Image (tube, rainbow, N blue to C red):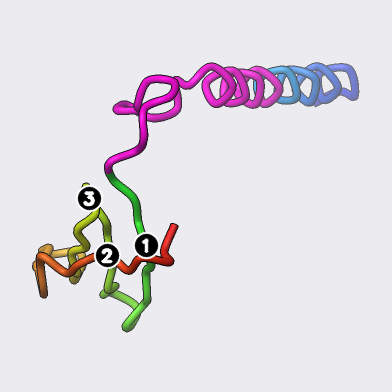
């Protein structure tokens, strides 16, 4: 392999990585990153309040939907609702 081919390969790799980064920036900038983004001005209905890793395979996640919190246990094999209908704290964002 000659030096010229190596330079062309490096330039091609740099161009592809640059295009990927440009596409990611554009998606984030214009709101295409999420599938169900709320429209401008509408409050978000779903948020992750807190997440804690239990071990290498399991995670506890507290989510809030419409002012009510739900505690979920996530693992590679299943998702389990631990507790539901928890009132959201007033001082939480």
Considering only order in the chain, which callout, 1 or 2, is on the residue closer to the N terminus? 1
Q: Nearer the viewer, mark 2 or mark 1?
A: 2
SS of the residue under disc 3:
strand
Name the residue beneath numbered marker 2. Answer: 88
Q: Give the secondary structure at mark 1.
A: strand
| Residue 25 placement, left or right of 34 | right
Report the magenta residues as a range.
17-45
In the picture, which quadrant includes the C terminus? bottom left
Of badges 3 and 2, the one in the foreground is 2
Rendering coords of residue 11 (x, y %): 80, 19
Q: Secondary structure at mark 2?
A: loop
Task: Tell me the residue at 37%/62% (across/down).
Answer: 49
**Residue lying at 35% horizontally and 26% vertically, measured from the top left:** 38
- Look at the picture and state if 26 lies above or below 71: above
Q: Residue 31: give x, y in percent of width and height.
A: 48, 21
Label at residue 49? 1
Within 10 Å of disc 3 (Cα), the crowding (few <14, some 14-19, many 20+) is: some
In the foreground, 83 or 35: 83
Q: Is residue 37 magenta?
A: yes
Indicate the position of residue 20 as horizontal and vertical percent values: 60, 23
Seen at 36% across and 65% down, the residue is 90
Quadrant where the image shows the N terminus = top right
Nearer to us in this view, 3 or 13? 13
Q: Residue furthest right?
A: 3
Q: Please state if 16 lies on the left or on the right of 56 as rendered.
A: right
Q: Residue 52: x and y, percent?
A: 37, 75
Q: Which mark is residue 19?
A: none
Judge whether residue 29 is colored magenta: yes
Q: Which mark is residue 65?
A: 3
The quadrant in which residue 19 appears is top right
């Amino acid at each position: 392999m000659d030096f010229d081919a190596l330079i062309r390969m490096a330039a091609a790799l740099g161009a592809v990585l640059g295009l990927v980064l440009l596409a990611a920036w554009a998606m984030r900038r214009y709101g295409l990153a999420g599938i169900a983004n709320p429209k401008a001005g509408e409050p978000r209905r779903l948020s992750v309040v807190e997440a804690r890793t239990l071990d290498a395979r399991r995670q506890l996640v507290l989510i809030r939907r419409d002012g009510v919190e739900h505690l979920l246990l996530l693992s590679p094999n299943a998702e389990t609702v631990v507790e539901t209908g928890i009132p959201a704290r007033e001082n939480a964002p």
